[in-house]
Image (cartoon, rainbow, N blue to C red):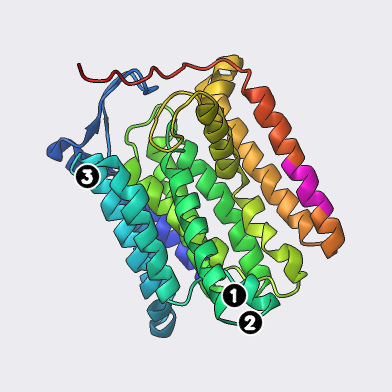
Amino acid sequence: MPPVLIAFTVALLASLSLTVPVRALALRMGMVDHPGPRKVHLTPIPLLGGLAIYLGVVLAIVVSMGGQARAQMVGIFAGATLVALVGILDDRGLLHHQIKLFVGMPLAAVILIAAGIRVQLFEAIRPGLAAQVADAGLTLLWVVGITAAFSIFDHMDGLCAGVAAMASVFFTVFATWSGQVLVSTLAAAVLGAAVGFLRWNFKPAKIFMGDGGAMLLGFLMATLGLKLRLTSLPHETSWMIPVMILGVPIFDTTLVSISRSRRGFLPFTTPGKDHTAHRLANLGLGQRRAVLALYGLGAVFGILALVLSRLSARQGYVLGALTVVAVLVVVALLERAPYERQQPRQKPA
């Protein structure tokens, strides 16, 4: 059986089965997300689901890859373990929420850079120290940005896991086409773990993945984007493929960043019911159909990535520009959709 199928199957079964004892552990530890004015659930829901996703991916990699391939995953899993641990501690209330954004995520990015996993954009154009520094800075921005995007994306049952699963499908396809066995296997493992977890997380959710799971998925998505190498594509546009595949969390982050900034809030430190899914639900779709609509949008972005892979550099830039314009138009339209506005925090007397 190909490593991709082994990884998917092992991760699926592991995540599906391990979520049950992990849920019991969360209840025993008191790691429960209580209802509140900024939440959409009405009853307490156990957290810690990210642990089941993490174990599913790790088991899949151990089973499906040989020793040399597993050794190449050390840097990836060091960073993944760090962000998962930071997220779990944040879920537990043991860390200030800004630690994950300004310490945990950047440190995980540095681990990837130290392991040789980074953007290769400027160095491919003009090799040199300045290009290496620029690529390292872009890697830091990419990893922190995508990880943070997923960390604020887990706000509705089944949303984060399902969108990550959809993106993993396209990462698996592109990596398989380019002959990258390690990347396709890792993507298939993430896909299996996310789908297995969805059995318990889709509305009505029995468990949440928490920040530990959301940050883990975001970090792994960012890593897959860095590891994907499409040598058959023009260098000028190949970097756009991971951006397209991760279009949904990027779109949602763009929406809330613009919306919250216009209202005087900090985008990543001010939670609220103003995300894309919230607005779609308020337009009459309801929570289930809003989540499914974003699954569909993830498929659309993935198909656009497939189309982009068949275009010349000039045609690719045109498609990219049209996509950006379309995103900004939809953001402007959704800005007018109803949502529950955040209240400014009261200053202590």
Closer mark to the observer between disc 1 and disc 3 = 1
Magenta segment main secondary structure: helix
Kindly identify which numbered label has been placed on residue 201. none
Q: Which quadrant does the C terminus fall into?
A: top left
Q: Are marks 2 and 3 in contact (CB under 8 Å)?
A: no
Magenta span: 318-324
Q: Nearer the viewer, residue 282 or 7?
A: 282
Q: Are marks 2 and 1 in contact (CB under 8 Å)?
A: yes
Mark 2 is surrounded, within 10 Å at the Cα level, by few (under 14), some (14 to 19) or many (20 or more) other residues, namely: few
In the rendered structure, find residue 131 and report the number of the disc placed on it.
1
Q: Measure the C-alpha gap from mark 2 to mark 3.
A: 41 Å
> Residue 80: x and y, percent?
36, 61
User: Which amino acid does the dot numbered 2 rest on?
Assistant: Pro
> For this rendering, which residue is in front, 176 or 334?
334
- Which residue is the site of mark 2? 127
Whole-percent x, y for residue 208 in the image: 34, 37
**Position of residue 109 measured from the top left corner of the image (x, y, whole percent):** 42, 63
Identify the residue position indicated by label 3 in the image.
95
| Residue at 76% over, 61% down | 309
